[in-house]
Amino acid sequence: MSGRQPRRCPPMAEPVDWAKEVWHARVLGPTFDGSFCVIMATETLRRSGIKELLVATNLDREVLVKGWVRTRRGNKYVQFIALNDGSTIHNLQVVASAELFPEENLKDVATGASVAVRGTLVASQGKGQTVEIQALEITVLGKADPEEYPLQKKGHSLEFLREIAHLRPRTNTFGAVLRVRHALAFAVHEYFNKNGFYYVHTPIITGSDAEGAGQMFRVTTLAPEHPPRTADGSVDFSEDFFGKPTNLTVSGQLEGEIAAMALGKIYTFGPTFRAENSNTARHLAEFWMIEPEMAFYELEDNMDLAEDFLKSLVRYALAHCADDLQFLNDQYDKELLVRLNSVVETEFQRLTYTEAVEILKTAKQKFEFPVGWGTDLQSEHERYLVEKHFKKPVILTDYPKEVKSFYMKLNEDGRTVRAMDVLFPGIGEIIGGSQREEDYTKLITRMAEMHVPAEDLWWYLDLRKFGTAPHSGFGLGFERLVLFVTGMANIRDVIPFPRYPKNAAF
RNA sequence: GCUUCCUUAGCUCAGCCGGUUAGAGCAUCUGACUGUUAAUCAGAGGGUCCCUGGUUCGAGCCCAGGAGGGAGCGCCA
């Protein structure tokens, strides 16, 4: 050894868990003393997503993919494996020649198994796909015994899949629905962020029982068998965690108004809970709701926003989920894409409740429930307006005050309020909103009439005492939006883990 | 909460008026086939007919209760 600093060999690349390491010797060249620095270098073959590979143009290169086997078929000379990694609805075809992979070695490459495949990305010899992988190495990462694995390559009923909610995301249908759901959630944030709205987190646990949006879930740490009692025998909630009765929220609106009266334009997007015993294809006990609230917005501004917002969301899905929507269109609802495109292009029909009642009264169709001014419209009435009469989305406004909430702004006629419902084909009410009552005296009068306890909502009334301003907002049921965009028929199939009466599995 | 329908093989479903050993397609297994596309072809295995009780000589089928699921309606988003 001389006194010169030895030339350093470069550090070996860190192994990466999602990569395949290809080990090979690499001669780095002579060092100062004439010896050769020879190291075992890892050349990491980075894992590729199937979505990118399917549209790749640089072929005839080695790639690594990992995913779940959808099907395997073939003969004793060649086997074809359809591989899906969740990045897209499409599968990548892996070709395994019998020379490299005798069929008995592929026993565990069965439907549902997870595998890693190293191979050459090539132009496909067969029809039906443009690229495929000629496999060099196949590793089974996790087996799926075909005798036990419930998902088969043939179709399953949506009801059956609901009972195996831990596996249904692996189906084409639920993969598509979940990707669309993600895209829509992302589009919600993008839309509001772009338009100057601030995202506000309103509480999940609420102490106000006055929101009036239906049955609530009680939140308590009191022992259900032996709760503490007051002198008169009723449950003593002063002993409870929060020192008062509390519930899961049914709406973030009232707190949203607080934020809007400071930040101008805000929105909430969070879980919402209703303990109603609703057994329909359009109700969940736990769902996600989007509630924008805007200071200085009147009802017309509110309608403009709702219409632009909905169209923007649908447009985003059409642009970013084309493959998934095409699949859903072909499998479940042949009119889906036509309907989505028509919503984006059509101006929503706006009319008042009073005008709608006149149309329904003169309609030739017979209704189960009679139509009359002063009663709320039934599902069949809304469907008639949207699907038969106008054949496009409808925004109904100015409902009788008796059928709407206490906080809606009273019109000058004293009989109607500045409410708006956006009605969609197949869904019914997708948005409900209003201009809020900003006048302290009128609001407290309405609260008394509707038996809403003013003392619990002193802070809500304060908003009208200090710097009150016209403001408006609405609520969009996120799952109803996903229902509309995916063309699914049951809301339980557009949320990963549905919560509904007698069902909280998974 | 109301109305109504359903529960038979791993999945989808048939099963006649109550009659002997409960069927089909797909899936699975075995075999055939040189590039398949839900591959195809041949063969095989596979059943607590949702549970409990009742009627009957005899119940998958009729009756009662229970459990689970679907659809429609109401409440709502």
Image (tube, rainbow, N blue to C red):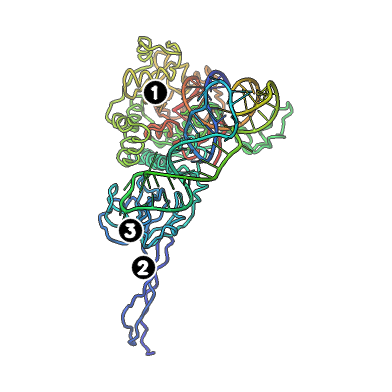
- Which sits earlier in the primary sequence, circle 1 or circle 2? 2
Q: Can marks 3 and 2 be said to lie on one chain?
A: yes
Letter of the chain that mark 2 sits on in the rendering? A
Q: Amino acid at mark 2?
A: Glu
Q: Amino acid at mark 1?
A: Met
Is residue A168 toward the left or the right of residue A236 in the image?
left
Q: Is residue A178 above or below residue B55?
A: below
Residue A43 numbered tag: 2
Is residue A283 toward the left or the right of residue B35 in the image?
right
Q: Which residue is mark 1?
A: A420
Letter of the chain that mark 1 sits on in the rendering? A
Q: Nearer the viewer, mark 1 or mark 2?
A: 2
Q: Which residue is mark 3?
A: A134
Quarter holding the N terminus of chain A is bottom left
User: Residue A182, position in %: x, y?
Assistant: 40, 42
Mark 3 and mark 2: Cα distance apart in space: 20 Å
- Mark 1, Cα crowd under 10 Å, few <14 / some 14-19 / many 20+, is many
* Residue A204 visible from this viewpoint: yes
